[in-house]
Every structure is written in structure tokens, then in C-alpha cells.
Amino acid sequence: MKDMKLKPMAVAFAICLVLLIGGGFTYQYVAQEKPLNQSLSQANYSHIELTGNKNEGYKVQLDILDEQPLHEAVAEAKKLLGEHGIGEGSYTVELKQEQTALSEVWEAYLFDIAEIMANQRYSELPELMNRIEEAHAHVDATTSVDEQYIYISLIADGQRLDKLLPLDGGTMGVWNNEK
């Protein structure tokens, strides 16, 4: 008699457990991940790839489109993530980079940039960008700043090299092989 009552309860418990877990995953995908991925795919300034999770932190990788401004691409990514409840402290921004001829231009000015960043003499960056443009006539060098980063872009002949340098004194990411 006792076995007859336990089987339906065990089956009902198993079905409820499957529905609860399956429903949670379905909700997470349909109501959270899918709308976020749709928003990120419609970005105007860059291709945005989001990896990671809420517990371990997200990694946002930006591939800046053509001649779009770097600071606008980062601001757009921050806005889109914020609209979906992902706060600035829960992700890191990385730039998709390929080795180009501009890497050599960047390497030629590494010491100057590292010195400016280490000594927090950020006002010297526009002057350095002008020197880069004068020394390399085909290169368009721009810089901008906000409360979190200094944005540097070198653009020439359909190629671009972008750098995000943090103002908080963290890892500067000046060197090409730095993670």
C-alpha cells in the first residue's frame, strides 16, 4: 500500500523538477539572452561579442566598424549592456585587434605613450597624435578621454589600430601582446 502512494509522488516530484529547471533555462534564454544578443547585433559602431556569465563576469569584445570613433563604440556597448541590467562593474571591455602595419607605428611611440600614462600627463596625448600624423602622412591619429578610459585610434589605408588605456592606473595595455 505504501509503495502505491510513493510512486505517484516521486513521479510528480520528478516532473515538477524537470519543468522548474527547464522553465528557468527557457526564461533565461527567451527573456534575457535572446533580447540582449539582438540588441548587441544591431550596434551601429561595432560588432559586439559578449562571453562569460553573471557569476564570473562578462567579457565584451568590440570589433570597431570602419572609421567609427572608438569612444562612441564603447559608449554604445555600455548603453546596450546597461539597458539589459549588466552594470559596468560586471564586465571588461576588450578590443579585437589584428596585426597591421599600424602596429609598427604604435610600437615606435610606446615609450612616449607609456611615459604619458605613467606620469598622468594626458594633455600631452593630442600633441603626440599630431607628431604621429606628421611623421606618418597616411596615418590619422585621434585621441579622446572620458571618466574611465583614454581612447587612441590610428587609422590608415583601410586598417585601424585602437587602444583603450584605463585612467584608474590598472594594466595599461600599451604593449601589443598584453592581455
Image (tube, rainbow, N blue to C red):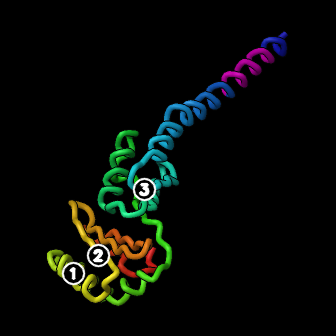
As displayed, is residue 146 above or below residue 152? Answer: above
Tag 2 near tag 3, CB within 8 Å: no
Which one is nearer the viewer's eye here, 119 or 138? Answer: 138
Per the image, the residue denoted by label 2 is 141
Say whether residue 150 is left or right of residue 138: left
Q: Amino acid at mark 2?
A: Ala
Distance, label 2 to label 3, CA atoms, is 19 Å
Residue 130 — which label? 1
- Crowdedness of circle 2 by 10 Å Cα count: few (<14), some, many (20+)? many
Question: What secondary structure is found at the residue carrying circle 1?
Answer: helix
Q: Is residue 10 magenta?
A: yes
Which is nearer the N-term, disc 2 or disc 3? 3
Quarter of the figure with the N terminus: top right
Residue 171 — which label? none
Question: What secondary structure is found at the residue carrying circle 2?
Answer: strand
Per the image, the residue denoted by label 3 is 46
Residue at position x 33%, y 68% from top? 164
Bounds of the magenta segment: 6-17
| Image coordinates for residue 133, horizontal then vertical, percent | 27, 82
Q: Quadrant of residue 107?
A: bottom left
Q: Quadrant of residue 138?
A: bottom left
Q: Is residue 73 magenta?
A: no
